[in-house]
Image (spheres, grey):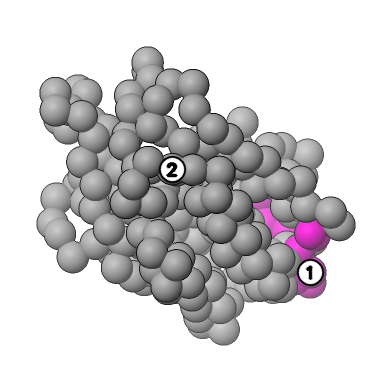
Amino acid sequence: MPFVAAPNIVQVEIRAIKNAAKIENRIFINCLHTPTATDLAAIETIVATEVNGFWPAILPSDVTITELHQKSLQTANDISKTLAFGGPLVGTVTGEPLPNQNSLAIKLTTGFTGRSARGRLYWLGLSIDQVTSNLVNSTNTALMLASMNRLRANLLAANYLWTIVSFRANGIPRPGGPVYFQVTGASLTDSQVDTQRGRVK
């Protein structure tokens, strides 16, 4: 797909390696103005603080978070920033890690209906100790949701909006350009183990 400008938007990629495969979570942040280097530095601090402080304790031992990469979607050749985590951010959950395709889908709510206004984030990996009878244990789902909602709140406090960016409608690029929906919360439809094969590169 050719580049499509998304004014005011910064794309943030949380990159990791799971069992030798590259994986990532990608989110979009609305700066409410043309993104600057100062914005990227501020967003980096907020996201890296959350990832550093809370993610390793909820991830299996075969996941290593490697870097945080950002780029402005204002124009095709715009500013970017990459943070290589200084120390190994390795998951500490005990038990045998589940295969790379196994994850948990976290629903990103916006207060609007329609497929374009819905988002999801797939957790970077699970351990057998986090699952009972194909259901992710409530202790772990609570920690995952708390992290997502805390990240959203911390971004909002700094005037950055976690946003769903819809580039396409009915299978084709939107003729007027992307539309935005602010993420208002993170929740679960259910706690069943999900499959997201496409997140493995």
Q: Is residue 91 magenta?
A: yes
Res. 122 visible in picture: yes
Q: Is residue 30 magenta?
A: no
* Front one among 115 and 43: 43
Name the magenta segment's main secondary structure. loop
CA–CA distance in space, label 2 to label 1: 35 Å
Q: Which residue occupies 65% across, 67% down? A: 49
Quadrant of residue 107 within the rendered picture: bottom left
Q: Which residue is mark 2?
A: 35
Amino acid found under the numbered disc labelled 1: Thr
Drawn side of residue 181 relative to residue 16, left or right: left
* Front one among 100 and 173: 173
- Residue 125: x, y in percent? 63, 56
Q: Which residue occupies 49% across, 21% down? A: 77
Badge 1 density bin: few <14, some 14–19, many ≥20, Cα 10 Å: some
Is 165 above or below relative to 73? below
The quarter of the picture where the N terminus appears is top left
Q: Which residues are magenta?
A: 88-100
Q: Which residue is mark 1?
A: 92
Element assignment for label 1: loop
The quarter of the picture where the C terminus appears is top right
Quadrant of residue 187 within the rendered picture: bottom left
